[in-house]
Amino acid sequence: MITLYVGGANNIEKGEFYIHEEKLVEHKYFAIALQKDTFIEGRTRSINFEEEDPALFSHLVEYIYKGDFNFHCEPSIVRLMAEAPILRYTPDWDAAVVSGAATATPETTEGFNVLTQLLCLGDRYDIDGFMDCVLEKIKSFPIGPEEVTMLAYTVLVSLPTIGHDDALRIFLVEQIRLNLPRLDSFRDSIITETEDTRLKMMDILTEDVSVARASFITNTVNMSLKVAVCIRDVTLEENLAKYGSDDLDSVKLGAAMIGDWFATPGVVNSGLMTARVGHSSIALPADAFQLLRGADFRQNLR
């Protein structure tokens, strides 16, 4: 058995993990560190990680044994309306979160923050497949402006070796595209960064997002849908006041900001169009949008 001593520096709580050597040496970092004729760790059968957090490290240990880890945070959201209850998050709410009509609860955002720290942990020790596993858990969370900003700083500042074709960067670019009109704080923070970081951030905000937007247009047209661009801000409260409660509706009322892009069938019912994000939808006033390429809304006269 190999003993991993974790924590102790900077008032971090200490922890110890006892792991079978054959499981550790499946991963390059530990295979090298545990060479008996090269490093002291190989002779003492122990490794110190005094600057790591044992709570975070426990997820890595679990992954080493199981190829997965349990993450005890059930994502939840709240709609941005008076006296809104906390709701269990499912992908059906993606459009509401992206549009600014709903947001993650503080506990959910904190859970998302832990996952971004696990990305960094996996990168530091090059554990095969761990970062992919973390990314899949990130995808199960509601992602609004705060989460996008958190993920962007993790990828661009803490994970500088992540390439353009990496699944994590591709996912980040798509989330930036979806949330772009609401990323003012992210844009403002760019000026406080080092030149290298500023260049990375500007690159992802301009070139990468432009490519992602072009791909979105192509995919939308290929699905026989239309691209709707928001031309005036719309709030959830405004929609509820105008169209009434949506408690019994399968497609909920949403929100939008100038510059939002959505896929839509282009059909208008009682002044509302359906806007799509992934497999989820929200209802928005058609008069707040303009269709690209000279397309027109079609009124449903039934």
Image (spheres, rainbow, N blue to C red):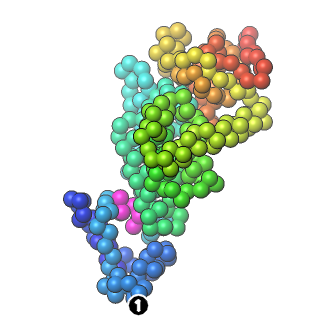
Residue beneath label 1, please? 37
Question: What secondary structure characterizes most of the magenta part?
Answer: helix
Residues rendered magenta in the picture: 56-61
Q: Locate residue 31, reporting x and y percent.
A: 46, 79
Report the residue that reaches farthest toward the bottom.
Answer: 37
Residue at image position (27%, 64%) is 7
| Residue 295: x %, y % from top left | 77, 20
* Three-letter code for the amino acid on which mark 1 is drawn: Asp
On the rendered structure, is 294 left or right of 209? Answer: right
Q: Nearer the viewer, residue 237 or 232?
A: 232
Near mark 1 (Cα within 10 A), the count class, few <14, some 14-19 or many ≥20, is: few
In which quadrant will I find the N terminus?
A: bottom left
Q: Residue at x 55, y 56 (%)?
A: 162
Instruction: Kindly identify the residue that appears in the image at 37 percent across and 75 percent down.
Output: 19
Q: Nearer the viewer, residue 13 or 185?
A: 185
Can you tell which quarter of the image residue 275 is in?
A: top right
Looking at the image, the residue that sits furthest to the front is 195
Report the residue at 35% width, 58% height from top: 56
Q: Which corner quadrant holds the C terminus?
A: top right
Residue 267's place in the image compared with 19, above or below, is above
The one nearer the camera, 169 or 189, is 189
Q: Position of residue 6 (x, y in %)?
A: 29, 67
Indicate yes or no whether the magenta region holds residue 257: no
Residue 251's x, y, as percent?
Answer: 58, 24
Instruction: Answer whether residue 138 is visible to the viewer in this image.
Output: no
Nearer to us in this view, 152 or 175 = 152
Q: Is residue 234 left or right of residue 106?
A: right
Residue 188, above or below 73: above
